[in-house]
Each structure stands twice: as structure tokens, then as C-alpha cells.
Amino acid sequence: MEQQGRAYEQALEIAATDARAAVVEVVAAALENLGGDGQEVRLGPLLWHLDDGLRGRARGDEGVDALVGAVEAVSLALAAERGAWDRDTVVRITGGDYAGRSGLVEFPCWEPDHAGRDIAPGPPNAYQVDLGRSLSVRVPTEELRVATPTTDPEVYMSVSFPGVWFGCVVWGDRLVRWSVERRGEDVPLGELGSAALLVSAALWDVAKADGLGEPADGSALLDTSLTAVGTLLNGTYDETIVGVLERTRPEFSATEQPLDGLRTLWGVHAGVEELHLRRRIQRLAHAIVIDHQAAGMRPDADPDADPADYLTGQTVVRLRDRLDDLAVWEQDRRARAWQAELHAHIYGDE
């Protein structure tokens, strides 16, 4: 009985990724079977034993679902022991029929050592990858790589758009909302929207000047210099922002009126109240870009760079340098929006 208790405790730990009682019981039974003389059971022989139990059996057969769950759970435990990719690691497929697709690791697939009733040493030879829409495929390890916001931004968030100006508006909104949420400030909605549009106009101006207006889907905007955007928005000369707004005349009706409003606000006939408002908008827009310049100081990119150089323009922070933070924020924002929508669907507008 004492040995059974130890086996069950160990099974609970091993099968932590799938703690269903039936799965834990299958792992515990295997541990008892293999460690009958009180010896410690290694994960390799345990996985081989469980996987061997699936031979000749099919989904739907009695006990197979729990056995499959046990195999996957032990496979993930072995991954942790050997330093393989964990469940839900985002990967990009680089070869085979699904090259270019991205998905989430479900579990690693190991090379069995049938003669030794064990798992061959080394990393897994393949991974089971969830591609969404009920499509799960087994992909050789050599045809996979880990995807990150920096190397594969399109996996995490939209980086191509119906047009370059459309992209500038989306990026401007992302930059502003990330910074304001991080600061925890309560900014009037009108000023927040105006600051976002001003940042978008500065992004457009810098992108056009640096030849990033092609391709037309705005994907080149990732190379836009936030350092140059910050320089345009520093507020030293009103004429600088006036010039940015005059040059920002895209053919996009949704932003035509708000842009005209900004041009009027920076016009020569602005009164004292308008001067105060445009200062608040300009300072907010500039502070937001400075936030991103500061957050984009990546020691891994240039460990010898002086932090002051980022703010003086000697070291350039580009939009792509902000992808790690913005991708996490974007995913969190989508999750919160989905939860709000679900709550409204279940509970109504209470």
C-alpha cells in the first residue's frame, strides 16, 4: 500500500499537465508495474512502456483516451527533463507540406529504443503541432523553429495592412494605448485620439522620407525610426508639426476630418485655449514616443550603447524593436476584449 501511495504521488507530479484522474491512474499503474522492486523508474522506460501499450489499439477503444493522455503527459515531462520545447511553444514550420505555417507545440515525439525498452537519448525527432481549425500535424524537428515577435511578428499581430497610412494609424494607436495603459493615466478620450493621430502622422512622415512607403501593404513600417518620430514631436518649433500635418494627406476618408481638426488646432489663428490643447496633445504624443524609445533600449542588440544615445538620436530605436512588448500587449488586449464580449453575451449589459 505504501508503494502504491508513492507511485500515485509520483504520477500526480509527472502527469501535472493532464491531471485527469484516469490519466494519473494509468501513469501510477505503469510506475508500479515497472518499479515493483522499489527501484526508481526513469521517464524514458516509462514513456516506452505506455506508448507500447497503444500498439494495435484505436481511439474509441476502452481506456485508450486515458492512455493517450498519459503518453502525452509523460512526453512533456521528458521534454522538461531534456530541455525540449514545452507545450504551447509558438513554432514556425520551415519545410514540408505546411512550410510557412505557424502553430503551438502540443507535445514532443521521441525516437523509441525498442531493444532497450527505452527512449533514445537526445532531443525529440518531431513535435505534434496544433495549426488551429482542428488541424494537428506531426512535424520533424529539423523543419521547425521557435517563432518570436522579433523574428516572426506577423504570427503575433498584423504587420501588413490595406495601405501604408492605414498601417501608420494602427501602429500609432498601438504605441499610444500601450504607453497610456503602462502609465495608468486617465487621459480624455479626445486628447488620446488626437495624440494617436499625431503620432501616426509623424510615423507616416518619417516612413515616406526614409523610402518605407513600399510595399503598399505597409509591412516596411517595421523599420520606421522612432528616434526620428520623437524628434519631429519634441515641440521645439510649431512649424515642424505644421509641416508634418501638411505633408500627411492620405486618401483615406475616415481620418480626413480628424487631420483637418489638427491642422486647424496648429493654425495661425488658434486662440489661448487651442494653444493649451495643442501643447497637451503634443506633449502626450512626444512622451509616448519617448516611452517607446526608452523601452526599446535593448542590451542584447547593442550591449555597448550608452542609454543617452537612444534619446539623442545617435542610436536608433525602430518600430520593430518594440515588437516583443507590443505583441504581448496586443494578445492581452484581444483576450480582454474576448472576455468582455463573452461576459456581455452571457450576462447582457448588466
Image (spheres, grey):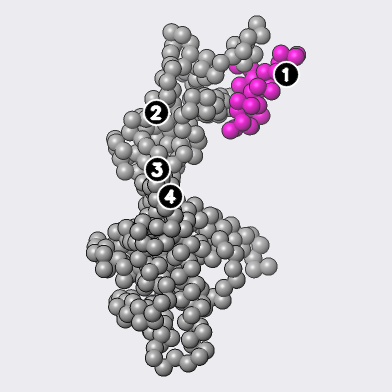
What whole-number distance in Å separates the C-alpha atoms at marks 4 and 2?
Answer: 33 Å
Q: Is residue 24 magenta?
A: yes
The quarter holding residue 320 reads bottom left
Q: Secondary structure at mark 2?
A: strand
Dot 3: few (<14), some (14–19), or many (≥20) neighbours within 10 Å? many
Question: Which mark, residue 147?
Answer: 3
**Viewer-nearest of discs 3 and 2:** 3
Give the mark nearer the N terminus: 4 vs 3: 3
Which structural element holds mark 3?
A: loop
Magenta stretch in the rendered image: 1-30
Disc 1 residue type (three-letter):
Gly
**Would you name the residue on which mark 2 appears?**
126
Which residue corresponds to the image point at 35% horizontal and 78% vertical from the top-left?
240
What residue is pinned by disc 4? Answer: 298
Q: Are marks 3 and 2 in contact (CB under 8 Å)?
A: no
Q: Position of residue 212 (x, y in %)?
A: 27, 63
The first of marks 2 and 1 along the sequence is 1
Nearer the viewer's eye, disc 1 or disc 3? 3
Disc 1 target residue:
5
Vertical arrangement, residue 239 with respect to residue 233, above or below: below
Circle 3: residue type:
Ala
Residues under labels 4 and 1: Cα distance? 50 Å
- Give yes or no for contact between labels 4 and 1 (Cβ–Cβ under 8 Å): no
The image shows residue 85, relative to residue 30, as above or below, that is below
